[in-house]
Amino acid sequence: MNRQPKYRQVADALRREINDSTYAPGARLPSESELSKRFDASRNTVRAGLNLLVSEGLISSSQGLGYEVRSHEVFELNASRFENLTFPQNGDAYSTDVTAAGRRPHQTFRVEVQPAPAEVAERLKVAEGSTTVLRHCHRYVDDVPWSTQATYYPGWLVEEAPRLSEPGDIAEGTTRYLAAHGIEQIGYFDEIATRMPTPEEARLLDIGPGVPVLLWTRTGYSAEKPIRCTITTFRGDLNRMNYEIGDLSARNETA
């Protein structure tokens, strides 16, 4: 005998059918009335089961349109190659990677002078509240919100590379621009975390209930000191990140 509450039985059955593609991405689920008959349950019970799937990010609901299986066309980012100048790319790494995947990149910018937040100041080894230039990108893949990226540059670096404070894109990418000015990023330290989005993040990235964000913080270093701190916030349901470390020749071997 199934001891699970009835609404969970409803959710479990529908979840299995979503996972086995009985209901494919973009498909509309049966109405609450139809599901009530199928599961011999009240509409309130069915609605509770559906709301559980909404909270898990599996389905979305629209007033008057019912419930629809969410589409998840995942973009895979190779974090080892991102901004690595030893790999061939034309201009900005994001645009290059998205285009190479056969997808269409689009981004908007804003540039601000800001006091360094505590967590950024610690990574850049500057005083909290000291001057930084923030370059903020709102990025899309095929017109779907993909990420926001906030990069902080210390004030001393902007004096040596003034284009960092200018609005708009730097066509060749900031890492290449700095390298051309003798400020070469020779290493980086990555931190990866997940959490639920803030209301502002949910708005910017069009995130539905139950979907977390992936936070990728990369601190870049020259030979002498940190030169930037980049905090990228991804939609957790549309992104996968990988790294290449060491000799991977065996990965491409056929059995």
Image (cartoon, rainbow, N blue to C red):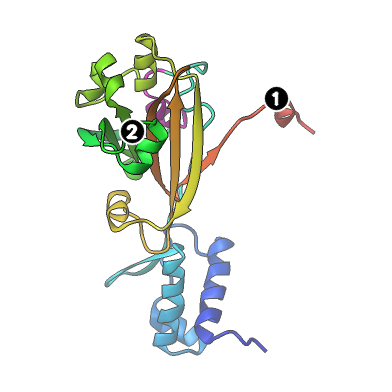
Tell me, yes or no, whether the two marked residues, 2 and 1, touch with CB atoms within 8 Å. Answer: no
Task: Determine whether 43 is above or below 253 in the image.
Answer: below
Quarter of the rendering containing residue 44: bottom left
The secondary structure type at the circle numbered 2 is: strand
Residue at left 41%, top 68%?
54
Q: Look at label 2 and name its amino acid.
A: Thr
Q: Nearer the viewer, residue 44 or 242?
A: 242
Q: Which residues are magenta?
A: 90-101
Q: Nearer the viewer, residue 171 or 228?
A: 228
Quarter of the rendering containing residue 208: bottom left
User: Which residue is label 1 attached to?
Assistant: 247
The secondary structure type at the circle numbered 1 is: loop
Task: Determine whether 203 is above or below 177 in the image.
Answer: below
Number of marks drawn: 2
User: Which residue is label 2 attached to?
Assistant: 151
Tag nearer the camera, 2 or 1: 2
* Image quarter (top left, top right, bottom left or bottom right) of the C terminus: top right
Task: Determine whether 215 is above or below 33 in the image.
Answer: above
Q: Look at label 1 and name its amino acid.
A: Asp
Q: Residues within 10 Å of mark 2 (few under 14, many from 20)?
A: many
Q: Position of residue 106 (x, y in %)?
A: 30, 34
In-image side of 254 versus 42 (left or right): right
Residue at left 43%, top 90%?
42
**Is residue 71 within the magenta segment?**
no
- Residue 38 seen in the current view: yes
